[in-house]
Image (tube, rainbow, N blue to C red):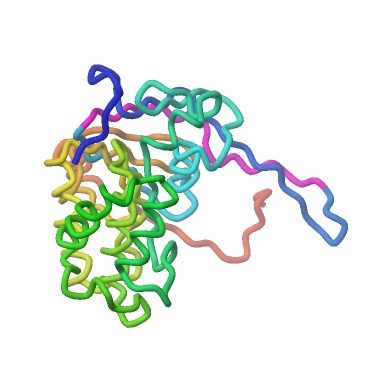
Amino acid sequence: MSGGGVNGDVAAVEVSGLKRVYAATRGLFGRSGRPIVALDGVDFAIARGEVFGLLGPNGAGKTTTVKVLATLLTPTAGAARVLGFDVVRQTSRVRPLINFVFGGERSLYWRLSAWDNLQFFADLYRVPRRVQKRLLPDLLELVGLSDRARDRVETFSKGMKQRLNIARGLVNDPEVLFLDEPTLGLDPVASQELRALVSSLRDANKAVLLTTHYMFEAEQLCDRVAIIDRGRIIALDAPNALKRHAAGLSVLEITAFGVSRAGP
């Protein structure tokens, strides 16, 4: 599968100086508090056919980055382009070329069958029914759910639901796929199956942005990894190169009690 109509020389994703600041309120009457800086000047680019990892702890800015690129959130400053189109000014050009898969068990209708779920989302993307007759069986086979096509999703395990989520994310044949912690809450076997599925997307020349807080997952799946912390990219390289940079380093964590922030 491959999307069409976009110049092959254009990068899949380009991010420059991206910032996102949230206004903060506190107290019963919503008094203004200190603004929350979720992204603080993020820069990176993703090539077609590349699996790019965004690695960091919870609250580091991973999901905010993905939501900006998926046109779900407007940046405060900076620029972001997907396949050459600006995510703010050219939203209608970006959306047909992308899809977004959350971690966990969201984005599916549990009382519908796997087939009906895929058909529903394909209809939303205006995929012709004649195309769906070929596409849906191919997607179900890709994610290993052909034999459960007519079963309700509520009977599926977490791993099966997430594999179906991946299939849902491919119904519009996107050129760029955003996966936000896709193995969240899965057992080791289901996680391994899902990683194998993500690896297969590279062969289809899809650009994949994968967020995770597992270094071993990023190492196994990604061509390059950006480490993000407090809204800033603090390292970006191939997984093996990042490991070499960190070799021999150690972290000393000190917890103090009974000491004020102002000091003695």
User: For the point 18% across and 48% down, which residue is it?
Assistant: 221
- Along the line of sight, which residue is nearer the eye, 196 or 248? 196
Considering the whole magenta stretch, tell me its main secondary structure.
Answer: strand
* Residue 79 visible somewhere in the drawing: yes
Residue 73, position as x, y percentages in the image: 56, 40
Residue 75, position as x, y percentages in the image: 57, 32
User: For the point 84% across and 50% down, which residue is it?
Assistant: 31
User: For the point 27% across and 52% down, which residue is it?
Assistant: 132
Seen in the picture, residue 195 relative to 46 is either above or below; the reply is below
What residue occupies the far bottom of the structure in this picture? 155
Residue 234, position as x, y percentages in the image: 37, 35
Magenta stretch in the rendered image:
32-48
Quadrant location of residue 155? bottom left
Give yes or no for residue 37 being in the magenta stretch.
Answer: yes
- Along the line of sight, which residue is nearer the eye, 110 or 105? 110
| Quadrant the N terminus occupies | top left
Give yes or no for residue 46 being in the magenta stretch.
Answer: yes
* Residue 250 visible somewhere in the drawing: no
Is residue 211 found left or right of 248 in the rendered image? right
Residue 63, position as x, y percentages in the image: 46, 48
What residue occupies the far right of the structure in this picture? 29
- Along the line of sight, which residue is nearer the eye, 151 or 61? 151
